[in-house]
Amino acid sequence: MTVKASSRREGNVFPRRLNPPLPVAVKSDGVWIEDQEGKRYLDASGGAIVVNAGHGRVEIAQAVYDQILAYDYIHPTMFTTPAAESLGSALAAHAPEGIGRFYFLSGGGEAVEAAIKLARQIHLANRRPEKFRLISRWKSYHGLSLGALSAMGRTTFRTPFAPMLADAVHIPPPYCLRCSYGLTFPDCRLRCALALEETILNMGPETVSAFLAETVSGGTLAAYPPPPGYLQAIRDICDAYDVILILDEVLCGMGRTGHWFACQHDGVVPDLVTLGKGLAGGTVPLSAVGVNNAHFEAICSHGGGFVHGGTFSHHPVAAAAGLALVRILERERLVERVAEWGPALGETLSNHLSDLPWVGDVRGRGFLWGVELVNDRASNTPFPRDQQVTEKVWQALFDRGIITYKSTGLAGVDGDAIIVAPPFVMDSADFEYVARNIRTAIEQVLADQNRER
Ligand SMILES: Cc1ncc(COP(=O)(O)O)c(C=O)c1O
């Protein structure tokens, strides 16, 4: 049966995108998605950088099926379950030293909000009730619910709701391409990390609860990794002022960068770490907050438990999917595969794109790469937002049957980039195919645009 997609005028779904009406997806397998017209799309971004083990994994389907028949909804304040316990242990085995407890939720933004609350409760447990304020970064992405949005630093998402947002203080991100201080690495001596210390001192260290940052900047800064030393510098500053370091790895965790946890690249251990997106490979909603053992002990000893929850937290069926995903990554050595093939993906993109006058930068780590588009390469001047360059290039690729991910707001409200973040099973022939098509799409959109001007 052919289904008509909901649009502005028809149907009963409130669609995520109003115009043009969305195609109707009916099948997914490996690195491919198919719509009901039979058109196939190469999923070069795992949707929203979610699908890490590939679509249609039988092992995960079987685990979910078995789990529902064994026991399905079990309320997390009444019971624990082997499903949740096993996933906790499986994650702890790969986590940075000391991260030994996992609180399971459904969405990435939920995990971020839980981490912000947990940081506060850790201070309460440690008899520091005056510590409550949050510092995060501009040009970050942490989710769209009000708490996560307050922390997030993407201007266009914040603006409509600005009067409703809580009072997080934002500092500049480590984004060397457009350094907020006009400096160059390494002569800058990590000025952007020192901004954290400066801000803590300005706010009063006794009031600051936590610093929240993406380990590798994802959705807004398009896969921009921090410069060497940055993460260690912010770790040291947090330690000096008793500030909880929350690393948001909803997008860059679960093997995406070639490490199980992206912070392992720099050998830095956060107090709290968030996971989501790839945690169940995209099969069911699942997220988590990883918690340092010492903080867990503090909550147990003095805090009387975490004042938090959710009807669907610690859900056994989601946990079963997550555990099956972890076992696939382990058995097929997919995180190792990302570490091995990630540089080739980056090189292929660079080789095909770097000479284009509109490509300002190709950067990334593992299977997470960003291609930043600029109006003028010498000055890194972005295109004005109303030219919708990202959207047009993305659409041109989608029309050609290639799925990438959009990133905008890299320079205030302006700034354009396309993210390539394929499932870990994608092979190198597909890298070439994706890179060649991105080149064609950019040329098609920007040559046309220049002609129109
Ligand atoms: C780093 C990061 N944190 C949090 C989120 C929010 O996750 P969700 O959309 O599942 O709420 C995202 C989503 O893109 C993200 O990239």
Image (cartoon, rainbow, N blue to C red):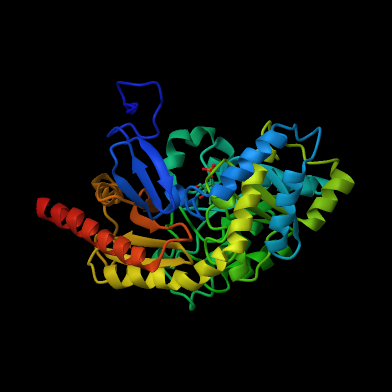
- What residue appears at the point 62 percent right and 65 percent down from the top-left corner? 234
Asked whether residue 169 appears in the rendered view, the answer is no
Asked whether residue 373 appears in the rendered view, the answer is yes
Residue lying furthest right: 301
Coordinates of residue 111 in the picture (x, y in percent): 63, 44
Coordinates of residue 188 in the picture (x, y in percent): 49, 74
- Whether residue 368 sits left or right of residue 316 in the image: it is left
- Whether residue 353 sits left or right of residue 266 in the image: it is left
Q: Nearer the viewer, residue 2 or 232?
A: 2
- What residue appears at the point 48 percent right and 61 percent down from the top-left corner? 424
- Whether residue 287 sits left or right of residue 216 in the image: it is right
Coordinates of residue 357 in the picture (x, y in percent): 22, 67
- What residue appears at the point 54 percent right and 67 percent down from the top-left corner? 258
Coordinates of residue 85 in the picture (x, y in percent): 76, 48
Disc tally is 0
Position of the N terminus, as image quadrant, is top left
- Whether residue 283 sits left or right of residue 89 in the image: it is left
